Image: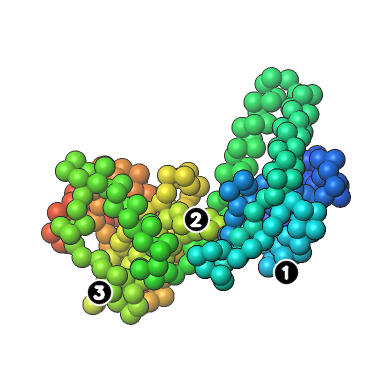
Amino acid sequence: MDAELVARVRTFNRTVTQRVGALQDRFLGRDRALGEARLLWEIGPAGQDVRTLRAGLGLDSGYLSRLLRSLEAARLVTVDSAESDRRVRIARLTSDGIAERRTLDRRSDELAELLLEPLSAKQRERLAAAMAEVELLLRAGMIEISDTDPEDPHAQHCLESYFAELNTRFDAGFDVKQSISASASELRPPTGLLVVARLGTEPVGCGALRFRDGGVCDLKRMWVAKTVRGMGLGRRLLGTLEMRAYNHGSTVVRLETNKNLTEAISLYRSAGFTEVAAFNDEKYAHHWFQMNLAR
């Protein structure tokens, strides 16, 4: 890693933590540090599953428990078992917790105004645009890609979202039953695999491989949620699947796609896929691509 880039990131982190008051033990002038204040905001008026809080904030379970106990002691939060499943613990704000959250929201707005006030109108626009870009890149770095069973709820969410989008984008709609098979059993080892990309607890993308004889591997079910497009996730998924195909021993990765999926076509071409003659009778395909994997 470039040492100068690392130094720039560290300088940025120090500036931000000081400027937003993260170093203070009384964040925004209240009786709690930033961690507890953020947890109040995440729990929200509707309450939240403790497991979801832990995963969404990336907190160690022990540290999260200490934060919740502190908020419970301050009578801002209650933590109880869910009625539908006693194993699930739900954190909820008390009436005092809701009032405290409102106060924190108001003071957060005031802090944002203080950050913007000394700047000119042009500088404010520059800062807001730069912050949006930084947030985009930071969120991109938080996305994790992992092998997932095709019948896992997150995988099913991605696949159903993928099929729904194809149905709106294809000229004649899309019916998975009329497309070439890529069933759950075909996307499990040893015949295939499926990966899901997650941002915190939210599934935001997927892709799959179907292994065939002769070192050939079909790329299937590539989808990225609209909420994370522009983060480079499509290329990450493609690179992950290429490496998985390589490690499996495949020498050729191929795919077919529809003419209306212009972004996908551009991605495949830029990644080194070459357009070839049709190698199957996929009803919805207009383009067929192939990449040879160097051993």
Q: Position of residue 133 (x, y in %)?
A: 59, 39
Q: Where is residue 262 in the image (x, y as percent from the top left)?
A: 31, 43
Disc 2 + disc 1, Cβ < 8 Å:
no
- Going from N to C along the chain, the mark reached first, 2 or 3, is 2
Report the amino acid beneath label 2.
Answer: Glu
Residue 9 shows up from this direction: no
The CA span between labels 2 and 3 is 31 Å
Instruction: Determine the residue positioned at 83% across, 43% down.
Output: 30
For marks 3 and 1, give the one nearer the viewer: 1
Number of numbered discs: 3
Disc 2 + disc 3, Cβ < 8 Å:
no
Residue 78 shows up from this direction: yes
Q: Nearer the viewer, residue 253 or 108?
A: 108
Q: Helix, strand or loop at disc 2? A: strand
Within 10 Å of disc 1 (Cα), the crowding (few <14, some 14-19, many 20+) is few
Q: Which residue is the extreme one toward the bottom?
A: 190
Report the amino acid beneath label 3.
Answer: Arg
- In the rendering, which numbered label is found on residue 62? 1
- In the rendering, which numbered label is found on residue 212? 3
